[in-house]
Image: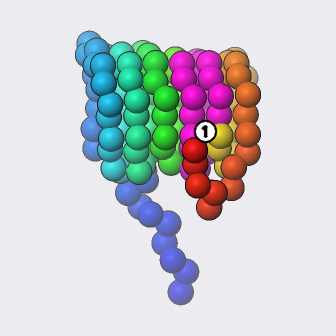
Amino acid sequence: MFKKKREESGIVDSVIGSNTSINGTITFENGLRIDGNFEGEIKGVGGLIVGQSGVVKADLDVVDLFIGGIVEGNVNARGRVQISASGRLIGNISASAMMVEDGGLFEGTSRRASSSEEML
């Protein structure tokens, strides 16, 4: 029998709405979606979604990252990073996989890390 992938990784159980601004440190499990403004540091054991209206100025340590808005900061992702056509990432990336859709912007350096490699 094959082991199932962690099903919780697709779950979003916390949302920062588009009319919300937060400064500080966020730690989360499962999933987090940011449609508002956040500045600080984010650490998660699940996936992070930055929606089209989301603006994040933070260093990120997450499993997977989907960027539809703006992220300024360094990213450690144990899984994959996806930048959509409306997404912008300014910072350095360490991830096991990365995809930038046509129209998306990535400005920085990238380093491929294996999923078993410990992140900095």
91 in the magenta segment: yes
Q: Residue drawn 30% across and 19% down? A: 23
* Residue 112 is at least partly visible in this image: yes
Mark 1 closeness class: few <14, some 14–19, many ≥20 residues within 10 Å: many
Q: Residue drawn 69% across and 30% down? A: 100
Left or right, residue 88 beside residue 100: left
Residue 41 lies in quadrant: top left
What x and y, as percent, mark residue 3?
Answer: 51, 77
Q: Amino acid at mark 1?
A: Val
Q: Residue drawn 38% across and 57% down? A: 8
For label 1, the SS is strand
What x and y, as percent, mark residue 16?
Answer: 29, 26
Q: Residue drawn 69% across and 49% down? A: 113
Vertical position of residue 27 compared to residue 55: above or below: below
Q: Which residue is mark 1?
A: 81
What x and y, as percent, mark residue 117?
Answer: 63, 57
Pick out the residue farthest to the front. 120
Dominant SS type (magenta): strand
Vertical position of residue 87 compared to residue 31: above or below: above
Residue 81 lies in quadrant: top right
Q: Give whichever of 41, 12 is nearer the camera.
A: 41
40 in the magenta segment: no
Q: Quadrant of the C terminus?
A: top right
Magenta segment range? 72-93
Colour convention of the picture = rainbow
Left or right, residue 76 beside residue 38: right
Vertical position of residue 81 compared to residue 90: above or below: below
